[in-house]
Image: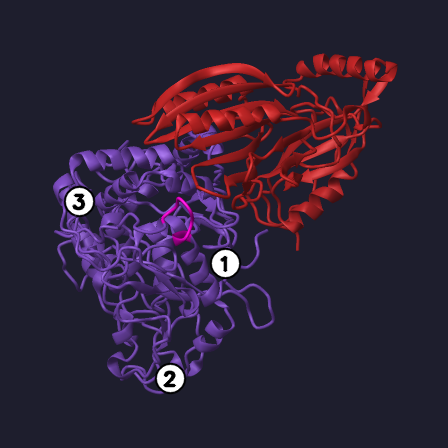
Chain colours: A red, B purple
Amino acid sequence: MRRLLYLVMAIGLVGWIAWSYGSVSRGAVTSSLSNPEDGAVANGRYVNTYFDLSYPLPPAWTEGLAGPEPSESGYYVLSSLVPSGEHDSAILIAAQDRFFADKPDNDLAAAVSDFREAMARVDGMTIDHEPSEMTIAGHVMRRVDFSGVGLYRGMYATEIRCHIVSFNLTARSPERLAELARTLDDLSHSTEKDTAASVPVCIKDYAVADNLLQRVEPVAAGPRFTSIPVRIVIDGDGNVKHTHFIHATAEQRQSIEDALRQWKFKPLRVNGESVEVETGLLFRFTSPPKS
Amino acid sequence: MLGVTVLSSAALAQQANSFFGRPGGPGGPGATDPGVRGGTPGAGGPLHGLSQNELNFFNAAKNVFNEVEGVPQGLGPRFNLDSCGGCHAFPAAGGSSPATNPQVADATANGAKNTVPSFITANGPVREARFVRNPDGTPDGGVHDLFVITGRADAKGCNITQPNFAAAVAQRNIIFRIPTPTFGTGLVEAVPDSGLQAALASNANLRASLGISGVLNHSGNDGTVTRFGWKAQNKSLLIFSGEAYNVEMGVTNDAFPNERETDPSCQFNNLPESTTNLTNTTNSGSPASDFSQDIVNFTAFMRMLAPPTPASATTASTGTTSSSSVQVASNSSVLPSAAGSSTNSSAASTATLTRGAQVFANVGCAACHVINQTTGKSTMTGQTNVTFQPYSDFALHSMGDGLADGVSQGNANGSQFRSAPLWGVGQRIFFLHDGRTDNLYVTIHQHASRGSEANQVIENFNLLSLTDQQALLNFLRSL
């Protein structure tokens, strides 16, 4: 119990330090080596250990068509859910990596507000519920409801590990939308807190000269002028412990992985203890590949 | 990476049929594609505001665009058709595939002895064919022209044969492309990269609520945004023209100066076959046109070709529904037409079109088919800072297994396609990259499949009332 208390205190302190770098997650506890797209529906639940989310599907719902692969801008379609009976509603669970978003400085409030403005500009669309904040399953969420052309929709978004994770609900009636919204009350953690590993602290732009002891540039490989977003986890010794290529070709992946293996960061220490850091790197090859 | 995408006949038909049996979806009596809008073509003329010299160039260049070429002018040794205007024909020069496919007659024109492949039919779309893989299994993706000049009166001694398309079809190793309309493309070319990037960023949060990402394609040469072609793989109208002249017609030019087919028995001309004219022998009234090689004329014609004009409300839906109930699709499979074969003579009301426009924006079509773009500084008279309505973000989107063709172009992978500009869609006959359907209702549903960014938008469409689905179709046919 005391260890858990120290851990919570350490995370809080690191969070305060990390905030001074730019942005930081509100640190949930989950397995550190899973990736955002690893979530899946099983036994009537959508479970995502990276985001520490478990969502029981509404009764008689099932997975819809799978979405696209993660994008160059760090966008994920995590799951698409539909009723298996009458087709009167749908749920999309998605995530946007804040490190690579087309609007890079969006925070949760700004993103939801921007979305609200975009919907308000659509001819025939009504904002039924202005953006507001609530807490569901320990997550601070922002909600906005809107409707038009007979579709009633709600977006519930939260920030986890420097991602904006959204539940996008669509229904043919306001009553049905309200039913779907109530199912979010059943959101829970995907893992038992007391058995889970600690979550790395996510820090934007952490891979800067002040923090890097050694940096080896990857050799140009694969197509030029494409964005290659990569999330890395840096262990307590300053080594790259985990690499997640969000969107890359095999050649690009190999080249960057070879380079990252040689990178060395200053260990981030908090309260005398080393802490793992999760950050984002964006590569873009502009010179021709070496033959 | 998504798997390879060439579906069998049965799979493609099954996929299409699945849309029609879905609870709450378009089962039973569904919305009806009003069909190709009747009346005069709302396209084919020059941009508004051009100078007289520019208009002269446009008119002369249009004639070059429609010229039929023979072997002495550079046709072949392999080709898909003998003129630009033959493929880009409907509803006017510069458009897309006409109702009667000219490739059927061209197969045997001037003594040629070509066999018409199974996927080319008299009332089907103009098509080019690409093989997905080489015989050794490595990626191909290149165009394999349908016809050869062997047997033509102007190609004595040439003795090459057509590719074995029947085998490619049997091996599911072939995909198709139909001509993209070129109306308004000069305006598209004049949009600065920053404009396209800003437009994409401006609706990022909206797209994120719909499962949509999107990315612009880029030139491997200079890193700038490419925007023409089904996969936005072409940088400019000049490159587009030069490549098509060589690949589709076999005419070498200053941009693509080498023959693709090098059989010695079929080389009849000095290369490049189309180049700058050093003397004016045409006297068209536009010296610029007369001295320019053909691809410069094609570029000038497309660059000054006006966008399609949307219909007024009273003429928006008076056309005839699809005359054919099925269309040949990939691998000779067929997709059902939801439109039936009746004639829809009821005019769409202004209220219906207004509602349809609302539906278009509300369900999320406009997230990719972005309505407005704005030109930057343009050398064309009166075309600077012009806001126009292409209904496209010109970005690439993953379109899922159902549409994926397994062909990479530029940075576009096998399942990515550019958001097809929807302007002029009211007067287009064939839809999707391979022309697999002539029905907008089917086209909408073909956007949904495993791995598609459009899945959520199609879910929204399926949740609409029948009245609103119909309003959307009427609106689209008004464009």
Q: Residues within 10 Å of mark 1 (few under 14, many from 20)?
A: many
Callout 1 amino acid: Val
Coordinates of residue B454 in the picture (x, y in percent): 44, 43
Callout 2 amino acid: Cys
Which residue is more in the foreground, B467 or B377? Answer: B467
> Which mark sits nearer the N-terminus, 2 or 1?
2
Which quarter of the figure has residue A160? top right
Q: Return the residue at label 1.
A: B407
User: Left or right: where does residue B418 sit relative to residue A140?
Assistant: left
Q: Return the residue at label 3.
A: B316
Coordinates of residue B253 in the picture (x, y in percent): 36, 63
SS state under label 1: loop
Q: Residues within 10 Å of mark 3 (few under 14, many from 20)?
A: many
Q: Residues within 10 Å of mark 2 (few under 14, many from 20)?
A: some
Which quarter of the figure has residue A68? top right
User: Left or right: where does residue B121 sit relative to residue B214?
Assistant: left
Magenta segment boundaries in residue numbering: B19-26
Identify whether B143 is placed above or below B29: below
Mark 2 chain: B
Quadrant housing the C terminus of chain B? top left
Number of numbered discs on residues: 3
Do callouts 2 and 1 point to residues on the same chain?
A: yes
Residue B20 part of the magenta segment: yes
From this viewpoint, is residue A216 visible?
Answer: no
Q: Return the residue at label 2.
A: B158
> Which mark sits nearer the N-terminus, 1 or 3?
3
Callout 3 amino acid: Ala
